[in-house]
Structures are given as structure tokens and as C-alpha cells.
Amino acid sequence: MHTTRSKRPGEDIFGLATLAVSIVLLWQSYEISGFSALSSPGSFPMACSAVMVLGSLLVVRDNVRRNRQATTTGDRMPIITLTGVIFMALILAYALLLEPLGFLLSSFLFLMAGMMLLYRGGVVKTLGIVLLALAIIYVVFRLIFQVILPEGVIPERQIMAALGNLFGGAR
Amino acid sequence: MEALQYFLISWLDPWLVFLLAAGTFAGIYIGAIPGLSVTMAVSILISFTFSWQVNDALCLMIGIFVGGVYGGARTAILLNIPGGPSSIATALDGYPLAQRGEAGEAIGLSTVMSVVGGFVGILALALAAPSISDFALGFQPRDFMLLAILGILLVGSLAGESLAKGVVAGAFGMLIGTVGLDPLTAEERFTFGMVQLWSGISFIAVMIGMFGVSEVLFQLRHMDKVAVKQDLSRIVPRWSSVRKMLPLSLQTSTIGVGVGALPGVGGDIAALMAYDYAKRTTRNPEVPFGQGAKEGLVAPETANSSAVGASFIPMLTLGIPGDAVTAIFIGALFIHGLNPGPMLMIEQPHMFWFIVGGLVLANIFLLIFGLTGIKIFTRIVEIPKGILLPLILLLSVVGAYALNNSVTDVYWMLGFGVLGFFMKEYGYQVGPVILGVILSRLIDENWRRAIISEQESLGSFFANMLTSPLSLVLFLTVIVILLSQTPLLGHARRALSRAK
């Protein structure tokens, strides 16, 4: 098995973690129905997890071999930068706030914070881009494709109904 | 002559032409948006078209189907987010092409080749429908299992730097596919007592996470890189490029037809098999596969488009859906008082030729819309990353939420996104994971059906497999591909040459 890429920080740990997870999955697969029958619900998961354990062992073996052969330190650039950590935290906050705040407000806050972090193009310009993008996404998904999105604190349906009455009344 | 009359119905009625054009146009954009699937669009359309004439309803749905399968390639090429499962293989070389500034040519080539594949599929539907259906009907559960195993062996092509890592990723994908209640016995598998896991993990959430979110996280480390300027001077591909790719596209169209005509197997598997075929048979590609090989773009695109026409074969001749979308088509035909199956071609041949005519026209519209709307679409990748990355993530979240109107799918998507990011960083490809999820159920169910029918006897399972010509061919193909992917064959060759 040839390897061309230099090793990355944490690759050994990831390989060992994969092996540990695959062993746990093998045990969990066995717990489904044991070796009761070839057609049992656990037979296929057991076969898959056994293959995963085998593959993980080979990966760990390759990592050990590469450690022995390594003459250079390889790519030592950290896997996650500070910006990455902050952005991941923003994504998590967005997912958690999606239902309580609703799609519009949580998406607005996420896009503003995300673009301020990554784009740094000034508040007014970012605000304009965010509002435009949000309006397009809302029209496409919510109004055209009728995708139900979390409403949250903004009473969208009442606003839409009021707008509908307004235009309906004008006719 | 009568067949031609029926064929031309949709061509001569301006309203039907409009519906086909509108459907194809809408399908391209629906297919391009991750999370908005063609299946979803067609099923929503059914509720709108209850009261329509059957011809009107079919034209709109055919247009959406044809456009949607193609549309998934656009976001796969531009953003590395396949619009649907049948575009997963397209992303493998399409996205690297866009990273090299060749998004315009990539989309142009994929459009033309999709249309070529589409026509091959329609030709197969028109000429070989009854015989192909008879062949597919003879498949035993073990044959479906072997076919799915053939599919999973593609991890060798998708594995990247290490076969072992590809195997780990593929097995992990298959395990994800088994989460939930067992479809045969309703026993819980990997649910850990949580009711929310009974229905399993949404495949689309895994796909959006592994491809979309992981790519966003991956790109965060390379924020300083300037957005690649896309060459849009030529969108209509050169005739020399088309001519060069034509033999491959015709061969992979055949794969698309063969796989698409099998009940329950759709364009997604056809595209992956075609990609594998192209990788195996292309000698000295201009650019290596996985780094922007045009062959890697053309093969899956022709295969998934040819599978569209072929998926109508079992539906119209046997009443068995070729894939999820044709299952909805069957529902629509029933609603309109038609009975798809062997009697349809005898009692209502006009319906068969009407659908064939509609498919041809939809492919012509695909060529027109596919080659004209690229510039705006391609500009997307030139947007600064600081703006584009939060927007991709927002689209991914909306797409995942739209699956079941549930934030749980969003959490799954994000979880698999983070996992996919680490996998990519450590040299594990995410393609095999998706392949595993897709094929897991097909292998699991058919293995168990096959072994139950043999009274749990492995001996008679293998004996029957070796005496059935179809099973034997599939089994030998599996063995040959398996050996070609492991060092065993090389060791054996060296041992033989030493012995000589």
C-alpha cells in the first residue's frame, strides 16, 4: 500500500480512535443477535464492522511503518486554526438557535457573524450582502418550494397573511 | 406510423412543449440545490397535478426528472456539493476542474454528454424495453447482492492514497446504512434505545455533511487563497473534445442503461460504476483521476442520464419502479387511471410512445438550457470565500432541515461534516462512505433473502450460485475485481515469473 502524503498532526491518534470505534461497533453488532443465524439482523453489521476492524488495523500498521521510516516532520500546520474553531462554534450556535429563534433571525445572525469573521468587508456592505442573500434564499425555499422552516420569534405566517390580505383587499 | 404519431403528440402541442421546457428548466435548478431532490419535487408536483390531464402532468414530471438528474452536476462541479446522489461521482473530478478555472468547460462538457447519455437511454427504452425487462426480471436476490458487492468494490477506485482507508470508510458507510429498525424483522440496530434512530440516519444529511460542510471547514484553512478565475470564453465544448470523449460516453451509457433498467437500482450506482469503468479503462488520461480528469466527469454524467430513460423500462413494461422517481411516476399513472405493467404496451401503446417523445424533447431542452445559463452559475465560485463559505453552510443547513422538517438532520449533517473534515485531512476519502450507505440496504436485504431461501445453508447457496449462469458471471467478476485491487495478483505474477 503506497503512501505519498506526509503525515499530519494527530494522524496516529485518529487511526487508533478509528480502530477503537470499529471494535466497539463490532461488539455492538454482536449484541444485536449474536451468531444465531446467517440471516439474523446482526449478521451483515457484524461482517461490516469486522472488515472495518481489519482495515483500521492495516491503517495503524501503515502509520507505525511511516513513523519508523520518517525522515522529515512533514506538514506541521495545525489541522484547525483559531478562525476554524470560532467558525465551528458559530455553526454549533446556529444549529442550537435555529428552532428557538427561527430561520430568519438565526440565519441573519449566523451570516453576519460568519461574514464579519471571514470576509471583513465592513458592517454596511456585509449587512447588504446578508439581507440580499437571505431574501433570495427565503423566496426560493420558503415561498417557491414551500419548504417549512422554523418560525421562531418572528411571526412569519401572520405577516404573510397580513400581506396577503393587504393585496387581496386592494384587488 | 402510429408510433410516430404518438411520439410527436408532445412536440406538436405548444402547451405540452411549454410544460416540458418549464419542467426541464425548473428541474436543473431543483437538482442543483442540495437537499431539494428530484424525488421530492416530483412527489410535490403530483399533488398539484391531480386534476390535470394525464399528458400535461407527465410532461411536467418528465421535464423535472430529466433536468433534475443533470442539475445535480452543477453544484458538484462548482461547490463540491452534489445536488443529489447521482452526482456524487461527478464531484470527484468535476470539482478539481473548477478549482483549475475550467468550470465553464466542465459544465459545457457535462451538459453535452448528459444529453448523449439521455438519448442512449431513450433509444434503449424504445428498442429494447421488453427484452431488457425480461432479463432484469430473472434476477435472484443473490444476483442483486452480487451486483451491490460489485458496486462496493468501487471503493478501490475511490479510496485515494490507501486502499485500507477506503475499506474502513466503505465499511463505516455500510454500518451507517444499517442504523435503525431492521427492515425484515424490525429489530433495533445501533439505536442505543433512542426512538429518534428507529428510522435510521438520513442518507442525504450524511451526504451534505460529508461533502458540503467538510469542504467548508477544509476551505477555512486556505482562506488566503484567491478565488480561482473561471475561464468562460468557451462554454460549448470543442468538437474535438466531444469526439474524443464520445466512445467513452457511449460505453458508460451502456452501463447506465444496464443498471438503470434493474428494478430498485438507479442513476447513483450507475454513475459510480461508470466512473470506476472509466478509471480502469482510460490509459494515460491528460490529468490523473481525482485531480480533474475529463473522463471522470463524462463517465458518471452520461451514465446517470442514460439511466433516466432506462429506469422507465421496468416501470412501463413490468409496473416495477426503476428508482424512487419512477415509483412516484407509477403512482401518478394510477391516479390518472392508467395501469403500468405488461398490459400497458398492449392496451395503451400511445402512452409508451408519448413518454418516449417527451423524454426526447426534454433532452433537447436540457441541451439548450444547460449551455445557456452557465455564466451566472459559474460566477458563484468567484465570490470571495468569506461570503461563499457561510452561504454554503446556510444552504446545507436549510437542505438538511428540509428533509424531515427536523433539526435532528441538521445535527447529523454537522456531525458528519466535522468527521468528514478530519477524514479528508488524514487521507480518508468520503466517497466510499456514501457508496457504503447507498449499497448497505441492497446487500443486507438480498444476502438475507438469498440465504433464507437456501435454508441457511452456505453450501447450497454457493452451489446454486455456481450453477446459475448469471450469478456465476457476476461472482467471477467480483473475484477478478477483488483480486485486481489487492497486492495478491501482483505477488502471484511475480511468483510465477520467478518459477519460470
Image (spheres, helix red, strand yellow):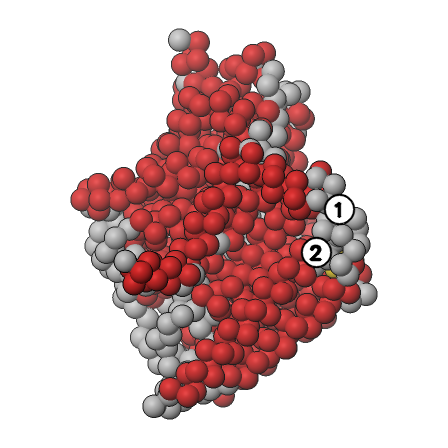
User: Which chain hosts label 1?
Assistant: B
Q: Is residue A34 left or right of residue B136?
A: right
Same chain for marks 2 and 1?
no
* Mark 1 lies on residue: B184
Callout 1, which amino acid? Leu
- Say which element carries label 2: helix
The residue located at (54%, 61%) in the rendering is B170
* Mark 2 lies on residue: A43
| Front position in the image: A104 or B9 | B9
- Tell me the quadrant of the picture where the C terminus of chain B can be found: bottom left
Q: Position of residue A21 (x, y in %)?
A: 64, 74
- Tell me the quadrant of the picture where the N terminus of chain B can be found: top left
Tell which tag, 2 or 1, sits nearer the viewer: 2
Q: Position of residue B181 (x, y in %)?
A: 76, 54
- Say which element carries label 1: loop
The residue located at (51%, 84%) in the rendering is A12
- Residue B466 can be seen, yes or no: yes
Q: Residues within 10 Å of mark 1 (few under 14, many from 20)?
A: few
Q: Position of residue B56 (x, y in %)?
A: 54, 26
| Front position in the image: B460 or B215 | B460
Callout 2, which amino acid? Ser
User: Which chain hosts label 2?
Assistant: A
Q: Position of residue B82 (x, y in %)?
A: 47, 56
- Residue B45 can be seen, yes or no: no
Distance between the alpha carbons at the discs numbered 2 and 1: 13 Å
